[in-house]
Amino acid sequence: MKKSILYSLLLCVSIFIVNSCQTSEGEAFVKGSADHIRKIATAVDDQMLINADNNQGNWLSYGRNYQEDRYSKLDQITKSNVDQLNLAWAKELNVSKGLQATPLVVDGVMFFSGPFNQVWAMDARTGEQIWYLDPQFDHDKNINLCCGFTNRGLAMYKGNLFMGMLDGRLISIDAADGSINWDIMTVPKGERYSITGAPRIVDGKVIIGNGGAELGARGYVTAYDTETGDQEWRFYTVPGDPSKPYEHPDLEEAAKTWNGDEYWKQGGGGTVWDAMAYDPELNLLYIGVGNGAHWDREWRSPGGGDNLYLSSIVALNPDDGSYQWHYQTTPGDSWDYTATQHIILADIEIDGAERKVLMQAPKNGYFYVIDRTNGEYISADNFVYQNWTTGMDENGRPIEAPGARYLDGQTHWIAPSSHGGHNWPPMTYNHETGLVYIPTANQAEPFVRTKSALDPGALGGGFEANVSLNNKLYWPAVMDSDPAAPPPMSQSGRLVAWNPVTQKEEWGVDQVGIYNGGLLSTTTGLLIQGDAEGMFSIRNIDNGNVLKQFDLRSGIVGSPITYEVDGEQYITILVGWGGYLAKLHKHVGRIHTGTVYTFKLNGTGTFPEKLPPHEQPLTAMRDDASHEAIGEGFNVFSRFCISCHGMPGTGHTATPDLARSTDAVYNNYNDIIINGTLSELGMPAMKGLITEDEIKDLKSFIFYSAEAVGDGMDPMAYITSIAEKQYAADQAAVIKD
Ligand code: CA
């Protein structure tokens, strides 16, 4: 039976020119029919995933193969004919919020996830929808999300798709018709976990991590049986309550690197929210582990310690989840320097010997080359400006710069910022050039140790418990900055071609937006990426020169794929501005509905209409609030609002600019904010977190901001004015106490 399915798939793949597949039994299926999808998706088994490089027409898993190199050997589209590349089809999805996912394609059928965990199946040649699934994300859980309503991808195995959900569920979906096979909860009830990352499949198990370090989560990854959803194993990345038995033996060792009780009471962090990779020969699963909670190690683990396995790459045996080795990129992390970023496996020649390596460019700004058989450090160097270290010692342990831990009560501008020299947008490793291409960001951020961050009363289980959100504007940040640091407000994205052998940049291209989409490279020397400005660029991989470019209307945070159907090579990118990275940069004048764009040579598709920029007018509402009330309003705003909405009046995000709402919205603020009457749109209910008095102050701050922006107040004068008001509010609070 199994053999005949495989045989029919081979026939299917070889008959590119016809619109149907002939099975060994002689049945003919129309491409995209449930019977066809059942056949082709059922054939995606362990061997097919392991041999993904022998099957270039498909894109079967998140990173294209287990090495996650996002490199394609399809060679129809080349440097010399790319000028003929044009739109094959575009499909508008009628969704706002971000589209971050990497689609999957098998034998001409495309599957992808979008905002609020919606899933689509489409004909990859035409964009014609085959099925659509809304698995009903629980909007009451919006408050658990750090970074928007996005999802980065699906996994496929033996006829089914798998997706981790924002509310912590993992679901198995029948690829043939979009029906749900099983639906399980992977996180503890009532705790603030969420899932945005793509599951990975290893030997009949679906492996999923989660996010929420800043919100009190204790990190872990879990393996579930793909058929039944039964749990197979769970690996915790940080130790828990020491009065209870350790869940696995290595946690006892890890616990020796932690101090005090604060960490396990708070969860400790270490969430595995993005990268994994698998080496079938070594039978090792690599996971990237996130930052500590709280950020400041002195608060999380008083007296120090490396705090294993925070900010580490950990190798596990996927059969039972047992620990094999680890490499910690940022010992005793105090800067949100996660090691959850993209992990690529490759075999490369170093000093005359072929090495099985693992490569990662985590948030801390260093590019690492590690021996993936045993975790041995090979080399590292910084791929963006950094000032938190003075270099690496011979074992790959960072030598911290004086003051980097900001324990002296002064503000220190640290680079990279907590957003990272590189965040989750995937890199690509090109086998022809031997280079890794990285979407990088140059940015510094002020870190300071505050009394309020150390006051247990300040712990709301949220971001406010951290010490660096730049939320006290009156601190003399600039004066205390490292003279070598870049100007704190200057920031830029840069597409970098990195040589992993010499640890040097071969070339780089500066980009307007700081955070741009993921990368794809081909054997024909193309480097493909969408950026925050909405431009989709096909570059010459040798120098970064743009060979062909399309304006896709909205900022791009997704990652492109390429595949082949009926003998034609296609390139697809999902476009929809949103997610965490989107809050940091104004992309274009207008955010269009989420859209899938697919290109091929001599495509004749019609681009959807680009609408003119539009901005709601600034509100004319005013009140006569005191300076202290406006300052307190800014405190409230910086705790609850800024991470999604950005500064009022600037229109910098995919979520509404809070200075440009209608009067009705302001008049219903209590209901909207406390009771969540707009939760369907993504605005969470904050009952118990925020008071009506605080909302009143928040409105005063917003009205003041609308007035300042409307009057054309100089941005520095505005910030200074807010800083003075915030200082007044904090002084008044001290006097009240
Ligand atoms: Ca984090």
Image: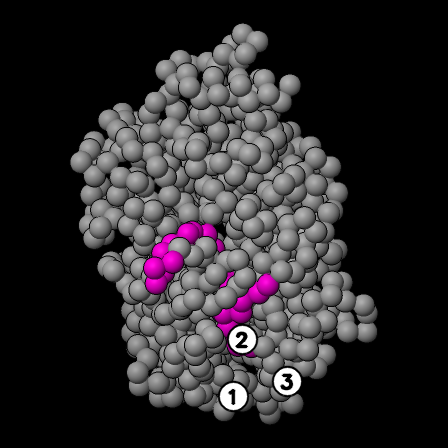
- What element does badge 2 sit on? loop
Instruction: Identify the residue at image location x=22%, y=46%.
Output: 540
Disc 2 to disc 3, how far (Cα)? Answer: 14 Å
Q: Are marks 2 and 1 in contact (CB under 8 Å)?
A: no
Type of residue at label 3? Pro
Amino acid type at circle 1 is Leu
Asked if the magenta segment contains residue 600, the reply would be no
Secondary structure of the residue carrying numbered label 3: loop
Instruction: Identify the residue position indicated by label 3 in the image.
Output: 302
Relative depth, front residue between 374 and 338: 374
Among the two numbered marks 2 and 3 on one chain, the one whose residue lies closer to the N terminus: 3
Q: In the structure shown, which secondary structural element does the residue marked by tag 1 occupy?
A: loop
Which residue is the site of mark 2? 331
Sequence-earlier tag: 3 or 1: 3
In the displayed structure image, the side of residue 717 where residue 330 appears, left or right = right
Q: Can you identify the residue that label 1 sits on? A: 407
Residue at position x 60%, y 92% in the image: 735
Q: Amino acid at mark 2?
A: Pro
| Residue 690 seen anywhere in this rendered image of the structure | no
- For the residues bearing labels 3 and 1, Cβ distance under 8 angstroms: no
The span from disc 2 to disc 1 (Cα, nearest Å) is 16 Å
* Callout in the foreground (3, 1): 3
Tell me the distance, in whole angstroms, between the alpha carbons under discs 3 and 1: 12 Å
Q: Is mark 3 within 8 Å of ligand 1?
A: no
User: Bounds of the magenta span?
Assistant: 325-353
